[in-house]
Amino acid sequence: MATYVLIHGAADSAWSWGFVAAELRERGHDAIAVDLPCDDDAAGLAEYADTVIDAIGDRTDLVVVAHSLGGFTAPLVCARVPAQLLVLAAGMVPRPGETANDWWTTSGYTEAARDRPDYGDDVIAQFMHDVPPDRAAEMLARGRDQSGTPMREPWPLEAWPDVPTRYLLFRDDRFLPADFARRLARERLGIVADEIDGSHCAYLSRPDELARQLDACLVHAR
């Protein structure tokens, strides 16, 4: 049995990981979803990592999973507590000294996304086009403001933590296109990404498949 530590992305909440957490528990694991202090302007990356570590408590056999902007927090956690695996699910992959604000350009995202359709303010179309309407509505209702504080802070680690790392992309992701995510995993982590179908919020549209893939990542890591 492992303990899955589930970290959400920008302006999101722990609720969004609830369906995956339930699937992981059905598979015999422990799972905790953490609410980051994303609407607190006094909280930066260190406070985000502190929040996750406080939630972990004395749990062991950790698998740290991060979505989107959570990719800036998860490695900080793995640098401070023993983890057997780190999984970035449609996650941002930072480099030392890089800010999240700069990442869009320095990672090549801006160029890669130049030709994608413009969805304007249609959050459903861009992030959740395959999510059941009731779940999408609930996620939007629970959404929070995202402070710019952690976006402006240089990523503080000197190197990626010494923990096995997997990258899981969502093939139908309209926000982080699959071709870009494949290149990101290869260039920044030196690995070939794992893949499942789904939008950027596949944890809401395909929680069973996502949990199954996370379980497979753990088996492979062992």
Image (spheres, helix red, strand yellow):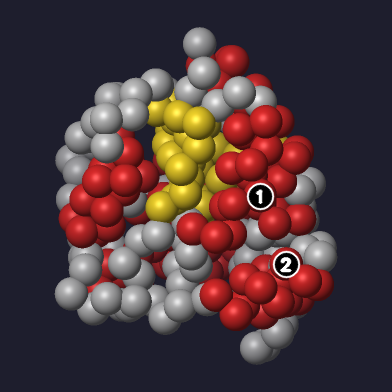
Residue visible at 31% across and 67% down in the picture: 37
Q: Secondary structure at mark 2?
A: helix
Front residue of this view, candidates 20 and 41? 20
Position above or below: 200 against 114: above
Front residue of this view, candidates 186 and 196? 196
Residue visible at 26% across and 43% down in the picture: 53
The reply to whether residue 194 is visible in this rendering is no
The image quarter containing residue 82 is: top left
Position above or below: 77 against 143: above
Q: Residue furthest bottom?
A: 121
Tell me the distance, in whole angstroms, between the alpha carbons under discs 2 and 1: 10 Å
The residue carrying mark 2 is: 135
Q: Amino acid at mark 1?
A: Phe
Asked if disc 2 and disc 1 are in contact, CB closer than 8 Å, the reply is yes
Circle 2 crowding by C-alpha within 10 Å: few under 14, some 14–19, many from 20:
some
Q: What label does residue 19 carry, if any?
A: 1
Q: Position of residue 184 (x, y in %)?
A: 52, 46
Q: What label does residue 123 carry, if any?
A: none
